[in-house]
Image (cartoon, helix red, strand yellow):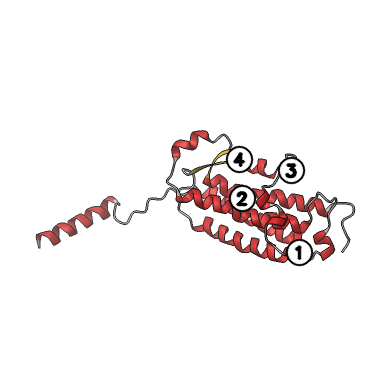
């Protein structure tokens, strides 16, 4: 009886102090979550719109032999989405490393602008070049991108994980996992711009 009474008193004390059933929530702010979801959803909508109704000739048009076609841009967008997400998942499986935050030299907005800046040309890694992605046509790549992106949007809607205190090093420097998330969205916007450059070429087929 004494043990049962003591247990009840302890439970009451935990409830009063707010310790019972408390979930430690180190998730991002509402503002950060809204921004991340906005850029993810916008870029998905824009890629879908930019590729809608294109003929085979339009999909495969190249301004020059060394330039990418609309289809190849989508291959790269879809493959990169998965590749970058695998880096994100790997970092999130590791313990938080807030001591590495001092290595981060770029702010969120600067990172997004840098990722989207087409004046700075970069060579895609071999595995992410269009011919190495494994896609057979634009529809296959686009559908894969849509499915994957919807999963990533769902993640951001519900996640309470500590994104800011997990820091990862990419080729251009250290960023936290929230920044990596928005970088993924910005990367697709970068190649959406490339795709639209193809469509703006003088020789782009009318249909």
Q: Quadrant of residue 52?
A: bottom right
> Which badge, 4 or 2, comes first in the chain's sequence?
4
* Quarter of the image that includes the N terminus: bottom left
Does the residue at mark 3 contact the one at mark 4 (Cβ under 8 Å)?
no
Q: Nearer the viewer, mark 1 or mark 2?
A: 2
The CA distance from mark 4 to mark 1 is 33 Å
Q: Secondary structure at mark 2?
A: helix
* Quarter of the image that includes the C terminus: bottom right
Q: Nearer the viewer, mark 4 or mark 2?
A: 4
Q: Which disc is residue 52 wearing?
A: 1
Does the residue at mark 4 contact the one at mark 2 (Cβ under 8 Å)?
no
> Which badge, 1 or 2, comes first in the chain's sequence?
1
Name the residue that disc number 3 marks.
Answer: 118
The CA distance from mark 1 to mark 2 is 22 Å
The CA distance from mark 3 to mark 4 is 17 Å
> Which badge, 3 or 1, comes first in the chain's sequence?
1
Name the residue that disc number 2 marks.
Answer: 184
> Which badge, 4 or 1, comes first in the chain's sequence?
1
Q: Nearer the viewer, mark 3 or mark 1?
A: 3
Q: Is residue 94 above or below residue 54?
A: above
């Amino acid at each position: 009886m004494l043990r049962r009474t003591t247990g009840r008193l302890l439970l009451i004390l935990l409830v009063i102090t707010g310790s019972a059933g408390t979930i430690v929530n180190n998730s991002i702010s509402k503002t950060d979550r809204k921004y991340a979801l906005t850029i993810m959803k916008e870029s998905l909508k824009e890629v879908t719109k930019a590729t809608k109704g294109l003929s085979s000739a339009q999909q495969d048009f190249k301004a020059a032999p060394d330039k990418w076609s609309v289809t190849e841009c989508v291959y790269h967008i879809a493959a990169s989405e998965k590749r970058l997400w695998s880096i994100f998942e790997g970092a999130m499986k590791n313990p938080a490393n807030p001591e590495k935050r001092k290595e981060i030299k770029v702010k969120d907005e600067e990172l997004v602008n840098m990722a989207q800046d087409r004046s700075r040309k970069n060579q895609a890694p071999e595995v992410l070049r269009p011919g190495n992605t494994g896609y057979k046509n634009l529809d296959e790549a686009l559908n894969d991108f849509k499915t994957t992106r919807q999963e990533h949007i769902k993640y951001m809607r519900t996640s309470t994980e500590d994104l800011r205190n997990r820091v990862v090093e990419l080729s251009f420097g250290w960023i936290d996992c929230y920044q990596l998330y928005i970088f993924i969205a910005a990367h697709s916007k970068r190649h959406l711009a490339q795709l639209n450059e193809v469509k703006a070429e003088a020789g782009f087929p009318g249909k």
